[in-house]
Amino acid sequence: MTNQTNRLMVAAVFSVGMVAGAVRGQSEDCSPLEPIGSFVPWDDLSTNFVFIAVRDGLLYSSRFSEPLGTTDFRVHDVSDPGSPVLVASVPNPLVGGGGDIILLGDVGVLQFAGLNIFQTIDLGDPRSPEFVEFYYDGGRPDFAALAAHGDRLAMGGLERIELFDIGDPSSPTLLGTYNFPIPSDSIAQAGYIVSDGRYVYDAGSHGFGLRIVDFGDPTSPKEVGSVASEGSVEWWWSPVLVDGRLYVLVEDLDQEFELLCIDVHDPSLPSIIARLDMPGGGCFKMVVHDHLAYVKCGTMMQVVDIRDPGSMEIIATQSVNVSRRMVIDGSVLYGHANIESMIKIFSLVGCPECEGDVNGDGAVDVNDISYVLLRLGDEGGNGDANGDGAVDVNDISSVLFRLGDDCPPIT
C-alpha cells in the first residue's frame, strides 16, 4: 500500500470517525487466539485419541483407536490453514495406532500407546514418510514420556530414563540409562520430561517433584538437582524449558492448580522463583510462544505473561474447544478437539500491548485501522478497540484517537 493510499484511507476513515466521536477504552475481552482453519484428519468418529506434531507447514498425526485395529500415520499440508490437504497416509505397522510424535531433523519418532515402545520414521521426504525401525527393550511395558533435543531422544518411564541417539533411524542406539531410586511408599506414576541435550528434567514421577539428571556422560548418568513436591501437591504436568527456566503445572489433592517457574540455570541448584494460581481446574497442558504461556484449563485457555518470571500474570482467558494435545509452530497453534475429532488451527494474535494497538505490533498506525476495517460487523474480539462488544465505526474512532502512539516494547 502506498503512502498516498494510506493518507487517503486515513482521511476517509477519520471523517467517518469524527461523526461517531472518539471513545477511549480498551477491550477487556481480548481474544488472543483467532480461528483460521479446521479439518477432520480421519472420516470416522471412532478416533478417540489423536496425536500431532507440526513443522514447516506440515502436520503429522497418529491415532490410538478403540477397538484396536490398523491405523494410519498421516501428513497434511497446512501451509494454507483454511484449506489443509492430505499429502500422505502410511499404514502403521503397530496394531492399535500410535502415540506422541517427536520430530528430530529428518527423523520422526512415533510412540506406541503412551508406552516405552517406539518406531522411527524416515522423514527425508516429509511428504512420503517411511517406517524404519521398531524399539522395545523387552522389559515390562511402562507408561512413558518422550523428549528430544538435536538427534537425542529421552524416554522417561516408571522406573528409568533412557537416552537414545536417533541420528540413524535404522539403528536407534541406547546411550545410557538412569534408574530412579523409588521409595516403597511412592505413587506408581510416570512423569513428564523435557531435555536440553545434556540434562533431562523429569517432573512428577512417583509424585516426587522435579528431578534433574545429567547425561553429560551417557554411560554414567547421575541426578544432580531436585525440587520436592510441597504440601499436598501430588501431580506435575507439562513442563516447558525456556531460557534457563522451567515452567510446570502442579496439582494438589484438592485438584487445585498452580503454575511454577523454577530457575534451572544451575541444574544443581534449582529453585522455585515464582508461582501463580491457575483458576478453573483441569490445567494439564501448556505451550509457550515468545513471552506468553498458553495453559489449557478445562474448556478455557488461560494466557499467562511470563516475560518477567517474578511477576507472572494471566492477561486473557478464552474459550477454546481443544484437548491437551496441542502444539505451536511459528505463530500458529494447532489442537485436537476430541468430541468433534477435528484439528483446529488458531493464529496467535496475542493481546494489544496498549490502547489502540489492535493488531499488537507495537504501534498505533494505519495498519490498526485496516485491522478494524477487515473485522467490521464482528461481535467483540481484538478488533473491538473500545470494548463495547461490537466492531464498528466507534472502534475506528478509538484507534484514530491514539494514532501515532508507541506501545511498550516487549523485552
Image (spheres, rainbow, N blue to C red):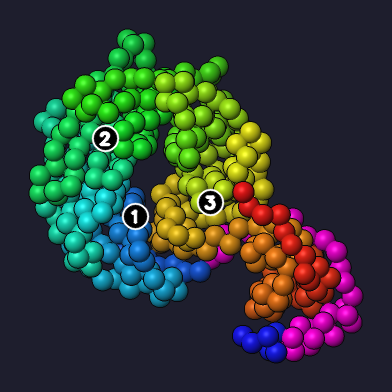
At label 3, counting other C-alpha atoms closer than 10 Å, the crowd grade (few under 14, some 14-19, many 20 or more) is few
x and y, in percent, of residue 99 in the image = 28, 46
Q: Can residue 144 be seen in this view?
A: no
Does 44 appear in magenta?
no
Can you identify the residue that label 2 sits on? 155
x and y, in percent, of residue 23 in the image = 86, 68
Which residue appears farthest toward the top when viewing the image? 184
Can you identify the residue that label 3 sits on? 290
At label 2, counting other C-alpha atoms closer than 10 Å, the crowd grade (few under 14, some 14-19, many 20 or more) is many
x and y, in percent, of residue 319 in the image = 59, 54
Q: Look at the image and give the residue range highlighted in magenta.
A: 7-35
* The quarter of the displayed image where residue 73 is located: bottom left
Instruction: State the residue at coordinates (45%, 39%).
Output: 240
Residue 352 relative to residue 405: left or right:
left
Instruction: Identify which amino acid the numbered label 2 is placed on.
Output: Met
Local secondary structure at mark 2: strand
Q: Distance between the residues labelled 2 and 1?
A: 17 Å
* The quarter of the displayed image where residue 32 is located: bottom right
Can you identify the residue that label 1 sits on? 53
